[in-house]
Amino acid sequence: MVSHESALDLHGLSDVIPEVVHLTVPRSKRYRPTSVGVAIHTSTRSLGAEDLTVMDGIRVTTAARSIIDSAEAGTAPEQLIAAVNQALERGMTTEQKLLGAARSSGGRVARLIQQAIEQARAP
């Protein structure tokens, strides 16, 4: 499924321009990119129905999951702040969903997401 910065782009969150198409597959699968410009990510966290949406027939991670995945992958903080702000403004996710997912990802991601939420709240 489309994930990370590629999913942010499809959702219209931030103005990130992915250098490659990011796809996430279960860790149990062994995939090799079949073409240049594709980044395959594996995930030990389950990809449940709450993490998925379909856009124009393409499976894409939800806004919240896309933000968390991008934070884990090192997307620039200013892009994450913009994505969080836009996702919250558009009702695509909630602060609680973002914070819950961020906590399960670890301290660095949780801090980034908390800072992004605080900046999104600022006037």
Image (spheres, rainbow, N blue to C red):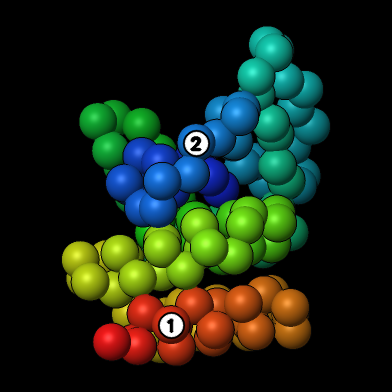
- Residue at x 65%, y 84% (from the top left corner): 111
- Residue at x 67%, y 75% (from the top left corner): 109
Residue found at the far top of this picture: 35
> What is the crowding at mark 2: few (fewer than 14 residues within 10 Å), some, or many (at least 20)?
few
Residue 36: image quadrant is top right
Inspect this view and state whether residue 100 appears. Answer: no
Q: Amino acid at mark 2?
A: Ile
Q: Position of residue 65 (x, y in %)?
A: 49, 61
Give the labeled residue for mark 1: 119
Give the labeled residue for mark 2: 17
Instruction: Tally the numbered discs.
Output: 2
- Residue at x 28%, y 30% (from the top left corner): 57
Q: Residue 92 shows which numbered tag?
A: none
Q: Position of residue 28 (x, y in %)?
A: 77, 44
Q: Residues under labels 1 and 2: Cα distance?
A: 22 Å
Q: Amino acid at mark 1?
A: Gln
Residue 74: image quadrant is bottom right
Contact flag, marks 1 and 2 (Cβ < 8 Å)? no
* SS at circle 1: helix
Label whose residue precedes the other's in the sequence (1 or 2): 2
Residue found at the far front of this picture: 123
Relative to 107, say whether 88 is above or below: above
Q: Position of residue 93 (x, y in %)?
A: 32, 72
Inspect this view and state whether residue 91 appears. Answer: yes
Horizontal side, residue 53 vs residue 17: left or right: left
Closer to us: 8 or 104: 8
Relative to 70, say whether 18 is above or below: above
Q: Position of residue 56 (x, y in %)?
A: 24, 31
* SS at circle 2: loop
